[in-house]
């Protein structure tokens, strides 16, 4: 069967992440034609964000982003393509990726504003009064612990909620965030006509009306029945009254959200028939961008947050990790682990211990031995998700590592390590936690292969550490920003499904192209040695014993 794409067509994928708005354009051969980026802090400084967010100075865990910043970034990014003389008329379909869990609150009457946008004016000027609150709670927020426990109790417990929705209640999840607004800002909740995720919010801008939430991103809200893929009545009732009407309908990720709005046709000269495919979350789009579709494959995304995810046929939701519908295959799921302390925490150690230089950081990592002389570190610059621990730094040394087995050694806590050991401790600590929690969540171990993406995927010293700790070959892709690439692929996939009037496996679209496109492997690191892997296995077990004690003593659950 012919699953080819029209020769002259282009496919546009966005990624509205924490710190920037990116875009990638693919041609009909799925090769990257162009890309652009808008950095929020530097290019939109009037919003006064740091790392794309506002943190409450009281230290209560409240972290938000200005909703209008994302609106302005869209116009700015498209204007960059205008300067590059992009022919928008060739774009057949658009899709996108949004940071997961973050929510937007449309004021009553805003749908009319979206439907009547003036192409002679910028979006931000026309939508400045469109939101019942101009601050969007984002995935970094940890201020909803009370609401999480309330929701879990209402549905019969944390495990019951996880089995129903794919995850126990988490502070960053949209359901607890909505409940907090309902309880603490009832006027805002009452004045809200529609609640969007960042993904459906950006799609709404593009179609000039409210876009549905896609099932994959919708599963990151503690509100959706993961098996039936509909809103859960009991979860909705546990969250806030009248919520279903404010959420709208759910849609499969490959569905068409609508045609591009006249605003973009007239202002940027998109073709009128350009399809807007449902946007989804950043991690599901990364799965699509990495062409992750084989059981036994594992992906690690090293970004502002670190994530680990893989494909599962019959996942078993538990108190750890998350189960979401697969965005490119409705017959299976993706299992995901999320760590809040990712690149920003690594950068903090780099700045304090490695002269603010990645070159120095890497030299320290390479010159220190595996297992770090028995030094184990736990680094939480932000309240952590997995494990559920508060801000803090904990360092331990296993005594007499060279003279006894790892299982028999006792540890003692210290205030700090020397600089090189600090560097290895942050990397080994993050990776050992990923491996341990992946095994607890039922992901295959050892993996057949690991595909690494995100900003730190270009760091070969970190890649070498991954292969030693996980014991398998590690690959990277041509583009570290797999979310916008995955969104562009999903735009093409959604266009194809729409043409065929049925779901088409995404693999059919790129089977003959994969070796000659940007999706091919850029760098591979062979599997580590089995003796070292065995030592890391014991080291990991000792780390998890200490972690479990920390959670019992300090945990936020």
Image (cartoon, rainbow, N blue to C red):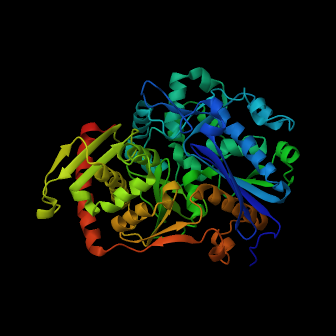
Toward the top, the furthest residue is 187
Work out which quarter of the rendered image holds the C terminus and state it. Answer: top left
Q: Is residue 496 above or below residue 340?
A: below
Quadrant assignment, res 532? bottom left
Looking at the image, how many numbered discs can be counted on the residues?
0
Q: Nearer the viewer, residue 529 or 70?
A: 529
Q: Nearer the viewer, residue 426 or 3?
A: 426
Residue at 61% across, 68% down: 519
- Residue 194 appears in the picture as rendered: no
Relative horizontal placement of residue 298, taking residue 437 as reference (left or right): right
Q: Is residue 199 above or below residue 427?
A: above
Find residue 182 and report its horizontal and vertical position in percent. 54, 26
Q: Is residue 137 above or below residue 80?
A: above
Find residue 91 and report its horizontal and vertical position in percent. 80, 58
Work out which quarter of the rendered image holds the N terminus and state it. Answer: bottom right
- Residue 468 appears in the picture as rendered: yes
Find residue 35 and report its horizontal and vertical position in percent. 69, 56
Quadrant assignment, res 522? bottom right
Q: Is residue 352 above or below residue 113?
A: below
Residue at 65% across, 26% down: 132
Quadrant assignment, res 271? bottom right
Relative horizontal placement of residue 107, taking residue 180 as reference (left or right): right
Find residue 199 and report its horizontal and vertical position in percent. 64, 46
Residue at 42% across, 52% down: 321
């Amino acid at each position: 069967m012919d699953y080819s794409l029209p020769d002259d067509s282009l496919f546009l994928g966005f990624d509205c992440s924490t710190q920037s708005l990116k875009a990638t354009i693919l041609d009909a051969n799925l090769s990257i034609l162009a890309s652009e980026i808008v950095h929020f802090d530097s290019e939109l400084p009037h919003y006064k964000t740091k790392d794309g967010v506002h943190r409450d100075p009281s230290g209560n865990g409240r972290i938000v982003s200005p909703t209008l910043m994302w609106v302005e970034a869209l116009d700015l990014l498209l204007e960059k393509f205008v300067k590059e003389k992009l022919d928008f008329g060739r774009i057949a379909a658009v899709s996108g990726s949004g940071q997961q869990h973050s929510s937007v609150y449309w004021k009553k009457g805003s749908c009319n504003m979206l439907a009547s946008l003036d192409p002679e004016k910028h979006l931000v000027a026309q939508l400045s009064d469109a939101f019942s609150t101009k601050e969007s709670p984002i995935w970094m927020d940890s201020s909803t612990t009370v609401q999480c426990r309330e929701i879990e109790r209402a549905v019969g417990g944390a495990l019951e909620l996880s089995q129903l929705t794919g995850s126990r209640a988490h502070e960053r999840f949209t359901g607890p965030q909505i409940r907090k607004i309902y309880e603490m800002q009832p006027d805002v909740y009452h004045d809200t006509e529609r609640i969007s995720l960042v993904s459906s919010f950006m799609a709404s801008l593009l179609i000039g009306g409210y876009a549905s939430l896609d099932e994959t991103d919708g599963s990151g809200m503690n509100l959706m029945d993961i098996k039936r893929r509909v809103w859960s009545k009991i979860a909705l009732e546990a969250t806030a009254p009248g919520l279903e009407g404010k959420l709208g309908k759910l849609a499969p990720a490959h569905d068409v959200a609508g045609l591009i709005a006249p605003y973009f046709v007239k202002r940027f000269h998109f073709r009128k028939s350009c399809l807007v495919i449902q946007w989804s979350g950043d991690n599901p789009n990364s799965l699509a961008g990495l062409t992750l579709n084989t059981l036994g494959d594992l992906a690690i995304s090293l970004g502002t947050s670190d994530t680990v995810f893989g494909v599962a046929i019959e996942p078993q939701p538990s108190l750890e990790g998350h189960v979401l519908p697969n965005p490119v295959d409705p017959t299976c799921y993706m299992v995901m682990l999320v760590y809040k302390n990712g690149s920003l925490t690594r950068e903090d150690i780099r700045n304090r211990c490695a002269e603010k230089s990645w070159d120095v950081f890497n030299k320290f990592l390479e010159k220190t031995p595996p297992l770090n002389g028995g030094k184990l570190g736990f680094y939480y610059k932000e309240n952590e998700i997995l494990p559920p621990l508060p801000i803090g730094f904990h360092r331990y040394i296993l005594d007499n590592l060279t003279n006894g087995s790892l299982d028999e050694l006792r540890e003692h806590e210290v205030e700090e390590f020397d600089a090189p050991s600090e560097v290895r401790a942050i990397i080994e600590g993050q990776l050992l936690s990923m491996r341990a929690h992946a095994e607890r969540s039922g992901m295959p171990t050892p993996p057949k292969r690991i595909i690494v993406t995100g900003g730190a995927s270009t760091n070969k010293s970190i890649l070498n550490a991954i292969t030693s700790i996980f014991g398998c070959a590690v690959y990277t892709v041509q583009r570290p920003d797999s979310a916008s690439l995955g969104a562009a692929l999903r735009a093409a996939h959604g266009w194809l499904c729409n043409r065929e009037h049925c779901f088409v496996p995404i693999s059919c679209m790129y089977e003959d192209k994969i070796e000659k496109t940007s999706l091919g492997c850029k760098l591979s690191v062979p599997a580590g040695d089995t003796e070292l892997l065995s030592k890391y296995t014991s080291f990991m077990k000792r780390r998890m014993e200490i972690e479990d004690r920390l959670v019992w003593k300090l945990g936020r659950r």
